[in-house]
Structures are given as C-alpha cells and as structure tokens.
Image: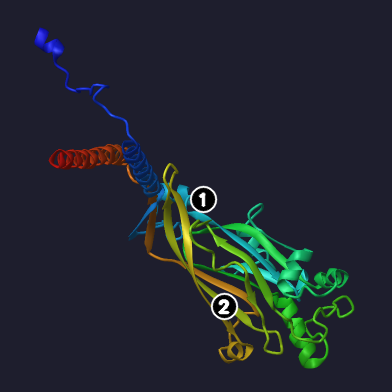
Amino acid sequence: MVLRSSFDAFAKPIDSVRERSVSGGFITLLASATAAILLISQLFIYLQVQTRHSMHLAHSVPSILFNNGGAAARKLVLNGQYHIPLKLHVTFPHLQCNSLDYAHDGNDSSSGKFEHYHSKPYTFTKRMPTLEEYKTAVGNTRVKTSELQKQRREGCTVSGTIHIPRVGGTLSVSVSPDAWRRATSVLAFGMDLTGGNTKDVVDPFHGRLPNVTHYVHDVTFGAPFPPGTNPLQGAHHVMDNGSGVALANVAVKLVPTTYKRTFHSERETYQASVSRHIVEPATLAAQRSMLLPGLMITYDFTPLAVRHVEKRENVFVFLSSLVGIVGGVFVTVGLVSGCLVNSAQAVAKKMD
C-alpha cells in the first residue's frame, strides 16, 4: 500500500534543481515560436479545400411522348421533376418589339403556340429596353443621354424564364415572319405586297432590311455552376456585313454537374460548352433555309455527368497533428537543450 502511494508515473522535477537562465529562456521562446508557426501552417492546410472530380452516367429522363415511362414517370414529368429553368435576357437595339418573335422547339409566339406550352409566370416578355440595356447593346456610351432615350424606342428586350425538359431543343429570337415578309416585299417591289392594309402598316425598317445585331445579357440553363463561368453571358453579336441580316447560331452542350461543398447539401447544376458562328444570308439562301435572321440557340445534354466534391481533412486528423506538433517540438527542444547542457558541463569538468 505504501509502495503504491509513493509511486508517481509523472515524476516532477524539484524546484531547487531547475535553474533559470537566459539561454534557457531563449530556448523556450524558440520552441514556442516554432510550435506556433507549425500550428498556423497546419491550420492553413486544414482550411484548404480538396477538390475531387468523378464522372458517371447521367440519369435517364423518361418521356411521356412514347408512353413508355409508366404512370409514375408520367406524374414526375407533369410535376416538373424532369424540367429545368431556362433564363433568357437579350436586347435587339435596332428592332422594335412588334417586329420580333421568339420560339421554342418550333412553337413561336406569333402563332400563340409558345404561350400554349409556356404559360405565365414562366414565359418570355417583350419590352422597350432600359437605358442601361440599350447602352450595353449598342456599345456606344459617348452619345448624349437624351439621344439614347429617343433611340432606345427603336429597340426591344426579350427576357423571362421558362421550364424545359432535360432533352435537347432549340430556342430562337428572330424577326417575325410577318415583318420579314413586309421588309423583303418593300425592298424588292417598293411596296407592301403581303396583303395587308398599307395605310395602317408602317414599314418599321424604312425601306431597308432589318438589322438583327443583338446583345445577349444572359442565358442560363438550370442552376449555374458556382466555381465556373457562364460563356453565354455578355455576348455581343454584331452583324457587320452591310445589310445587318444574319443568323447567330449558338450550339450549347450542357454537362450535368453535382456540386457538393463541406457542410452544404448537394446541388444539381449545369456546365455549358459553347460554340458559335454567324451564318451569312447568302448561306441561308443557298441552303434554302426557312430560318429567319436573329439568334438561334441549339442545346443538348451530354450522357455523362460530373460530380464535383469539395471537402476538408478529417477534424480528428487535424487535432492529432496539432497534438503531435506541440508535443514533438517541446520534446525535441528538450532533448537538444539537455544534450547541449550536458556537453557544456562535461567540457567544464575536464577544464577544471
């Protein structure tokens, strides 16, 4: 019993034996500074985010058009589970709204089919551009504000959000068929031969072909991918071929991307790969294309999906490293200082 009470696994040094000196204080200060630097570096490493990428097959989307998805799939499709939002914001500075038309998968606004498939509040609207939108679209800020206020009445902005199924499709914003027929008729024959009342119909293009130069403020499919950029923002398509007539053809490949951050839930986003070119009117005429001048966006979804995960080191590994750093520094410094002190004492004894 006496032996057990006298046993101490952590023997403490006697105060009279421990000597305080300037060199000892310097060694203690050096050890503390080293431990602090290593602790800060370990904390910095812990705060760094480790990014991991992986690829897998994207989830298939059931279709109700061929009636092969069953009742459950049909219910999900009708409830919007397999739809994503498509946001559009584009300004045509030289086209009035009554001469502009938009369509999705061939369902245009002029015939009323677009509103049949995309009812409010998820639809597009046409309006006169604001002063800032018009300045951005024309790219000329040296003109007086009063002049820009008058000129912007000749422009039109199309904006809004619709919900589209997760399958490929086409979105277009172009000259309306009626306005195109009037413009070509007046240009070719000097008068409107479309059958309308010429007293009520005013040529909006003043005897010229329509200038379809436009500025794409934003086109976003689904939720944007936070670490990336949207290549469909801030695109200026200038038709500088003399006539102002051309078709801006934009092809978009959408990559489904699952984005996961530490302490956050997963987000289903989309990355876009874009290629664009301007189709001249001679090419459209040679191919006998039925497409009208303006903007056409063709999009499709890749069968492969990406999983983007951002994570930090395990917190227990971080704590273990901190304990190892602090303990290791002081133990190492203690051993080195003890070795130096013993060596100095041995040299002193020999000299005596």
Report x, y in % for residue 320.
28, 38
Report x, y in % for residue 271.
47, 62
Please tell me how many numbered marks the rendered image carries.
2
Give, as a three-letter code, the residue at label 1: Gly
Q: Is residue 325 visible?
A: yes
* 2 and 1 marks in contact (CB < 8 Å): no
Q: Residue at x 26, y 41 (%)?
A: 333
Give, as a three-letter code, the residue at label 2: Asn
Report x, y in % for residue 236.
64, 75
Q: Which label's residue is closer to the chain start, 2 or 1?
A: 1
Left or right? Give the position of 117 relative to 158. left
Q: Residue furthest top?
A: 1
Q: Classify 10 Å Cα crowding around label 2: few (below 14), some (14-19), many (20 and above).
A: some
Q: Residue at x 45, y 52 (%)?
A: 268
Q: Residue at x 88, y 75 (%)?
A: 200
Quadrant in which the C terminus is drawn: top left
Question: For numbered disc 2, what is the local secondary structure?
Answer: strand
Q: Classify 10 Å Cα crowding around label 1: few (below 14), some (14-19), many (20 and above).
A: few
Residue position for label 1: 80
Question: For numbered disc 1, what is the local secondary structure?
Answer: loop
Q: Quadrant of residue 343?
A: top left
Report x, y in % for residue 42.
35, 46
Residue position for label 2: 249
- Closer to the camera, 90 or 187? 90
Where residue 296 is drawn, which disc sits there? none
Q: CA distance from mark 2 to mark 1?
A: 29 Å
Q: Residue furthest right?
A: 199
Reply above or below: 87 against 240.
Answer: above
- Given this view, does label 2 or label 1 mark the residue nearer the observer? 2
Q: Residue at x 35, y 37 (%)?
A: 22
- Closer to the camera, 155 or 45? 45
